[in-house]
Amino acid sequence: MSEPLYIDLLIQNGDFVLNTGNEPTLCNNRQSIGQDVIHSIIESGLATELIAERSPVLRADLFTRIELLIEDDERIVPGTVEISEESQKRLWVTASTYDFGGFTVQVDA
């Protein structure tokens, strides 16, 4: 286990995860970066645009914009981002970090 560099509150299903003492659970490093990626995609509005878009060409453009958004994070290795679409409202994002290796996160729009 590597030293915690990035610490965040753990969020699942849009809400804080609480421990048995009703205190927020913390996450760090790879999990925190993955969580930041999810939130950046949702907050950018690109996930909503992707749901609304029907044109294959414009959808491909949105996927490129999402990749560039993720690669803009200084913790992510450029060129390692891969996005796959499970359904119209669910994406899987895989990327590598400089310090903590690869991760895969699910983005539900």
Image (cartoon, rainbow, N blue to C red):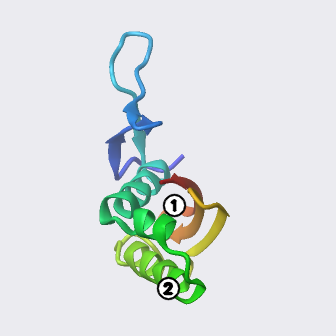
Q: Give the residue at mark 1.
A: 100
Question: In the image as oriented, which residue stretches furthest toward the bottom?
Answer: 57
Question: In the image as oriented, which residue stretches furthest toward the top?
Answer: 21
Q: What x and y, as percent, mark residue 6? A: 34, 51
Is residue 4 depicted above or below 61 in this figure? above
Q: What x and y, as percent, mark residue 78? A: 47, 83
Residue at 47%, 36% in the rendered image: 13
Is residue 72 depicted above or below 7 in this figure? below
Residue at 38%, 32% in the rendered image: 15
Q: Earlier in the sequence, mark 1 or mark 2?
A: 2
SS label for mark 1: loop
SS label for mark 2: helix
**Whole-number angstrom distance, CA of label 1 to CA of label 2:** 33 Å
Q: What x and y, as percent, mark residue 68? A: 41, 81
* Residue 32 visible (yes or no): yes
Q: Please identify the quarter of the rendering in which residue 65 is found.
A: bottom left
In the image, is 94 to the left or to the right of 51? right
Q: Nearer the viewer, residue 48 or 99?
A: 48
Q: Amino acid at mark 1?
A: Phe
The label nearer to you, 1 versus 2, is 2
Q: Please identify the quarter of the rendering in which residue 82 is found.
A: bottom right
Label 1 crowd bin: few (<14), some (14–19), many (20+), radius 10 Å: some
Label 2 crowd bin: few (<14), some (14–19), many (20+), radius 10 Å: few
Q: What x and y, as percent, mark residue 49? A: 41, 69
Q: Give the residue at mark 2.
A: 58
In the image, is 83 to the left or to the right of 75? right
Q: Amino acid at mark 2?
A: Leu
* Residue 98 visible (yes or no): no
Query: Tag on residue 60?
Result: none
Residue at 48%, 86% in the rendered image: 61
Q: Please identify the quarter of the rendering in which residue 55 is found.
A: bottom right
Residue at 44%, 64% in the rendered image: 47
